[in-house]
Image: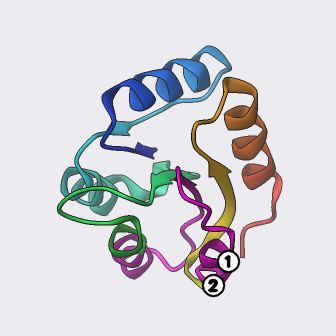
Amino acid sequence: MIIDDEPLVLRLAKYTLEKNGYTVHAFDNPVDAVAFYREKREGVDLVVLDMVMPDMDGVAVLKSLHALNPRVRAVLCSGYNQDSQAKDLAPLGVCGMIQKPFDTMELLAGVSRALAEPAD
């Protein structure tokens, strides 16, 4: 699942991941994404999550997802350096960080690394 309010980033990430065999549910609205996750969380292995969005930032989204499923796994994306925040959020399921702007290889590597980590 990808949550990002930037249409171009969302389309590129969805296209790249689907082209490489992943099933992707993409959302530009975090409220809709949380509602989807509430219903379909068993089918979501990983969330790629933008940290800076209007209405609901990435931390709020992550907390909502974690409340629904304490085993949620997420990779954070941001144009700002938030490596320390990613480490602080590890207890909420964060297992990686991708710096924006990213290229397709960075996205694929970040997703692959996160999925290779054993689930708690």
Q: Which residue is mark 2?
A: 88
Kindly state the secondary structure of the residue where label 1 is placed.
Answer: helix
Report x, y in % for residue 26: 37, 36
Q: Amino acid at mark 2?
A: Asp
Q: Which residue is mark 1?
A: 84
Mark number for residue 76?
none
Q: Is residue 9 above or below residue 114?
A: above
Q: Residues within 10 Å of mark 2 (few under 14, many from 20)?
A: few
Q: Which residues are magenta?
A: 63-90
Q: Is residue 111 above or below residue 95?
A: above
Report x, y in % for residue 109: 78, 38
Kindly state the secondary structure of the residue where label 2 is placed.
Answer: helix
Left/right placement of residue 104 relative to residue 109 reads left
Left/right placement of residue 110 relative to residue 48 reads right
Q: Is residue 105 above or below residue 3?
A: above
Q: Amino acid at mark 1?
A: Ser
Q: Closest to the observer: 67 or 16? A: 16
| Residue at 35 percent of width and 52 percent of height | 40
Number of numbered discs: 2
Q: Residues within 10 Å of mark 1 (few under 14, many from 20)?
A: few
| Residue at 17 percent of width and 62 percent of height | 55
